[in-house]
């Protein structure tokens, strides 16, 4: 897995990881750690990694991606307002880059506190 992510080719990483999800392959703890530490800009790839590692912040980004399959699978994973608050508390405590700020801004615009109910559903 480390060799794959070291290619820095997000399309290749996505294409090589997709069968792990579609075929319900298990990933080892060491591969899980590698994926958790991997930084990407593609929301579809981040969503896929979230699905493979059960990482709610990445699943949230997957809900915003352009890939219809990943977006739908991420939308099947429910989140709550408490999840959003916990994510914000964790990620706002650490130094972050301009790219991180862009991601946070997009998530907060998509899921503003006043438009999300206690179960994490967007209010219509």
Image: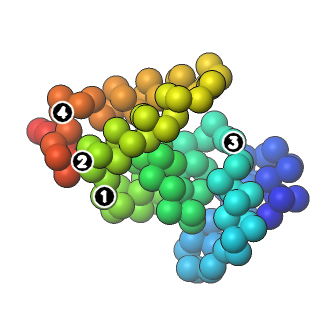
Helix, strand or loop at mark 4: helix
Depth order, front residue of 112/15: 112
> Going 81% across and 44% down the picture, which residue do you hit?
8
Helix, strand or loop at mark 2: loop
Badge 4 density bin: few <14, some 14–19, many ≥20, Cα 10 Å: few
Helix, strand or loop at mark 3: loop
Decide: is 34 above or below 82: below
Contact check, label 1 and label 4, Cβ < 8 Å: no
Residue indicated by mark 3: 39
In the image, residue 111 lies at what x, y percent? 30, 35
> Going 65% across and 54% down the picture, which residue do you hit?
36
Residue indicated by mark 2: 120
Q: Earlier in the sequence, mark 1 or mark 3?
A: 3
Residue indicated by mark 1: 78
Position of the C terminus, as image quadrant, is top left
Q: Earlier in the sequence, mark 3 or mark 2?
A: 3
Residue indicated by mark 4: 115
**Quarter of the image where one finds residue 40:** top right
Badge 1 density bin: few <14, some 14–19, many ≥20, Cα 10 Å: few
Helix, strand or loop at mark 1: loop
State the CA–CA distance, disc 1 to disc 3.
Answer: 23 Å
Contact check, label 3 and label 4, Cβ < 8 Å: no
Contact check, label 2 and label 1, Cβ < 8 Å: yes
State the CA–CA distance, disc 3 to disc 4.
Answer: 29 Å
Decide: is 102 above or below 47: above
């Amino acid at each position: 897995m480390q060799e794959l992510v070291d290619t820095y080719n997000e399309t290749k990483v996505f294409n090589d990881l997709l069968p792990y999800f579609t075929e319900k392959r298990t990933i080892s703890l060491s591969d899980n750690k590698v994926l958790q530490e991997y930084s990407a800009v593609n929301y579809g790839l981040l969503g896929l990694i979230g699905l493979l590692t059960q990482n709610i912040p990445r699943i949230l980004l997957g809900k915003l991606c352009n890939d219809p399959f990943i977006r739908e699978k991420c939308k099947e994973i429910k989140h709550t307002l408490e999840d959003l608050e916990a994510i914000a508390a964790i990620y706002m405590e650490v130094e972050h880059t301009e790219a991180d700020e862009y991601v946070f801004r997009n998530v907060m615009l998509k899921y503003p506190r006043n438009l999300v109910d206690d179960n994490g559903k967007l209010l219509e």
